[in-house]
Image (cartoon, grey):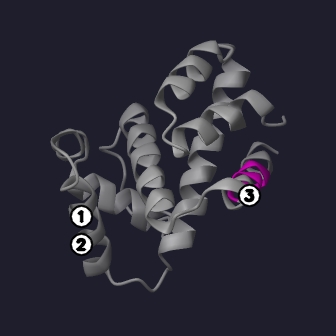
Amino acid sequence: MPIRDDQVATIHAFLSAENERFQRLNQALSGSPAARKGYLVLIFATFVEAVGHRFAAETPQAEIIEYVADVRARSADAADRIDPDKAERVIRAVFDDGVPLDDVDAGERTELEMVLALAIVSDAGVTGTDLDGFLDRARKRGEEILG
């Protein structure tokens, strides 16, 4: 199943901090189970791509802890929305399938993936054609996951 252009455009708006455009595109996405699955896989693939851009398997846990604390410190909303332990584990799970995530429900995990991907992409200054390339890689990764 291919990931659709409107799904990529929605994530592009989110990562570009075009909040009104993101809200409009997100609301317009088809609600079919297959489309929803494709969108969730794209979010996951975007997160994996972002984490791989910022961290490596060898990154010390202390660096991940420090990064999550920094992201949470950026706003009261971020501090409220991001459980530090869960966020750190979601990041580590990109490199280690053995990281336990049983206590992170699907909705919370998706939110953490989106917020952390946005922070990483923003911190790296990924915009314009670099963002397009980044999302092309995420789209390919997502389509591989979907088979």
Q: Residue at x 67, y 18 (%)?
A: 33
Instruction: Say whether residue 136 is magenta.
Output: yes
Residue type indicated by callout 3: Thr
Between circles 2 and 1, the one closer to the viewer is: 1
Question: In the image, what residue type sits under mark 1?
Answer: Asp
Nearest the eye: 2 or 69: 69
The answer to whether 142 appears left or right of 93 in the picture is right
Q: Distance between the residues labelled 2 and 1?
A: 6 Å
Q: Are marks 3 and 2 in contact (CB under 8 Å)?
A: no
Residue 100: image location, x then y, percent: 36, 58
Left or right, 130 with respect to 79, comes to right
Residue 57 horizontal/vertical position (percent) = 49, 80
Which quadrant of the figure has residue 48? Answer: bottom right
Name the N-terminal-most of marks 1 and 3.
Answer: 1
Q: What element carries label 2?
A: helix
The span shown in magenta is 134-141
Mark-to-mark CA distance, 1 and 3 = 27 Å
Q: Residues within 10 Å of mark 3 (few under 14, many from 20)?
A: few
Callout 3 secondary element:
helix
For marks 3 and 2 on the same chain, the one whose residue lies earlier in the sequence = 2
**Residue at horizontal 41 percent and vertical 42 percent from the top:** 109
Residue 124 placement, left or right of 5: left
Gap between marks 3 and 2 measured at Cα = 29 Å
Query: How would you classify the magenta stretch by its main secondary structure?
Result: helix
Provide the residue designation for mark 3: 129
Residue indicated by mark 1: 70
* Tag 2–tag 1 contact (CB < 8 Å): yes
Residue pointed to by mark 2? 66
